[in-house]
Image (cartoon, helix red, strand yellow):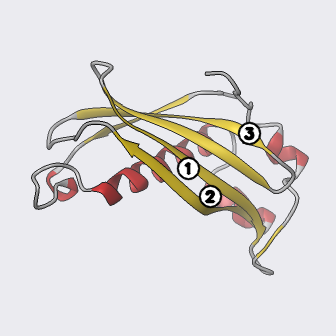
């Protein structure tokens, strides 16, 4: 189990908007990719959630943009679980260049839902025990 997970990403031409830097919505995509990769690394790939019949859906995203990212920038999206309740969790992110310069900070509130009923459901112990909650990074 890894509490912190670093997801690498190189900014590509498709990430660039009309202002010649990475478009805001790409940051959301990068955080989601990092969350899925972290879950996979901790034993819970997407397929396993489908087998369970329940998994994570986003309730809200919050991003604080500090500096722009440009084509060719090598990034690291660091993620960790900051809190967990019976049917939800908050995941934090720090998006930085490989030289350590922080470009953005983000958080996502995730709800654990039953896929068939499309309703929140309690996070099973076998899922919860695979993610360490980090309250003071």
Q: Is the residue under label 3 in contact with that under label 1 (CB below 8 Å)?
A: no
Mark closer to the observer (1, 2): 1
Disc on the earlier residue, 3 or 2: 2
- Residue name at image x 14 percent, y 53 percent: 13
- Residue name at image x 80 percent, y 81 percent: 117
Q: Residue 52 at x, y = what percent?
A: 80, 63
Q: Quadrant of the C terminus?
A: top right
Q: Is residue 107 above or below residue 74?
A: below
Q: Is residue 63 above or below residue 54?
A: above
For residue 46, which numbered disc appears in the image?
2
- Residue name at image x 62 percent, y 58 percent: 46
State the residue position of label 3: 83
| Quadrant position of residue 72 | top left
Q: Is the residue under label 2 in contact with that under label 1 (CB below 8 Å)?
A: yes
Q: Residue 112 at x, y = what percent?
A: 75, 60
Q: Secondary structure at mark 1?
A: helix
Disc on the earlier residue, 1 or 3: 1
- Would you say 68 lies left or right of 45 here? left
Q: Residue 20 at x, y = what percent?
A: 10, 52
Q: Is residue 7 above or below residue 45?
A: above
For residue 100, which numbered disc appears in the image?
none
- Would you say 120 lies left or right of 40 here? right
- Would you say 70 lies left or right of 85 here? left
Marks 1 and 3, how far apart at CA: 17 Å
Task: Bin the neighbour count of mark 1 within 10 Å (Cα to Cα): few under 14, some 14-19, many 20 and up.
Answer: some
Disc on the earlier residue, 1 or 2: 1
State the residue position of label 1: 36
């Amino acid at each position: 189990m890894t509490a912190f997970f670093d997801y690498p990403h190189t900014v590509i031409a498709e990430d660039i908007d009309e202002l010649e830097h990475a478009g805001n919505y790409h940051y959301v995509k990068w955080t989601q990719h990092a969350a899925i990769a972290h879950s996979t690394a901790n034993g819970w790939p997407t397929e396993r959630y489908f087998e369970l019949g329940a998994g994570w859906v986003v309730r809200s995203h919050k991003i604080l943009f500090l500096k722009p990212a440009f084509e060719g920038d090598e990034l690291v999206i660091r993620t960790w679980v900051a809190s967990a309740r019976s049917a939800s969790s908050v995941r934090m992110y720090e998006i930085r260049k490989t030289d350590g310069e922080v470009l953005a900070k983000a958080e996502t509130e995730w709800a654990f839902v039953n896929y068939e009923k499309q309703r929140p459901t309690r996070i099973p112990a076998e899922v919860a025990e695979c993610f360490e909650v980090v309250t003071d990074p």
